Image: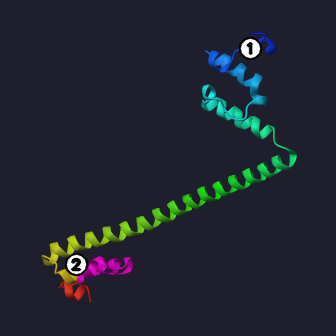
Amino acid sequence: FRFLQMPLFTKQEHELTSHFDKWIYFLKNLEDLDSIPAILNEPVFNKAFRAAEIANLSYQQHTTYEQNLLDYMGLKAAMANAKDEGRKIGLIEGEAIGEVKGQAALLKRLLTKKFGPLSPASICKLDTATVEQLETWSEAILDCDSIEQLLR
């Protein structure tokens, strides 16, 4: 433990050498500080200075501050929730698109193996098909004699 008599601490800003000195200077002179001195410009002192400013607010100012803080936290939570929802929707849409592209690619490979190279019109039709169309064509591929018959 260190016993400290605040009135006996007389160091000025330029004499502060340790973190302990800085804290004692901060605590002793906080009431007279309008802004943070350069020597105390560290995150821990910035945070302490902000806490002291909040503690020094009038009742009305403090009530307004707390209401604004609650509004901010609510808005921040709503934004985070909206981001999460957007991510979920994006994943679902991405999976659906990937599934369609995968089905189309598989059907193209099967058609190429069965009928040979595909025409640009057939490729275009496969690339723009819906999931339902791709499934219907996939089920009917073994029963068709030509690509044209399948893609009608």
User: What kind of secondary structure does the magenta stretch mostly adopt?
Assistant: helix
Is residue 47 or residue 137 the one in the foreground? 47
Among the two numbered marks 2 and 1 on one chain, the one whose residue lies closer to the N terminus = 1
Above or below residue 32? Residue 151 is below
Q: Amino acid at mark 1?
A: Thr
Whether residue 137 appears in magenta in the rendering, the answer is yes
CA separation in Å, label 2 and label 1: 85 Å
Question: Which residue matches tag 2?
Answer: 123
The way the protein has been coloured in the rendering is rainbow
Looking at the rendering, which quadrant does residue 81 occupy? bottom right
Give the residues drawn in magenta, as a range.
123-143
Residue 29 appears left or right of 127: right
Residue at position x 79%, y 30% in the image: 31
Callout 2: 10 Å neighbours few (<14), some, many (20+)?
Answer: some
Residue at position x 64%, y 54% in the image: 76
Residue at position x 22%, y 78% in the image: 123
Where residue 66 sits in the image (x, y, percent)? 78, 49
Question: Which residue matches tag 1?
Answer: 10
Above or below residue 46? Residue 28 is above
- Of the 4 image quadrants, the one containing the C terminus is bottom left
Where residue 87 sits in the image (x, y, percent)? 50, 60
Where residue 117 sits in the image (x, y, percent)? 13, 76
Q: Amino acid at mark 2?
A: Ile
Instruction: Kindly state the secondary structure of the residue where label 1 is placed.
Output: loop
Is residue 49 or residue 85 the one in the foreground? 49
Above or below residue 3? Residue 53 is below
Residue at position x 22%, y 88% in the image: 149
Whether residue 149 appears in magenta in the rendering, the answer is no
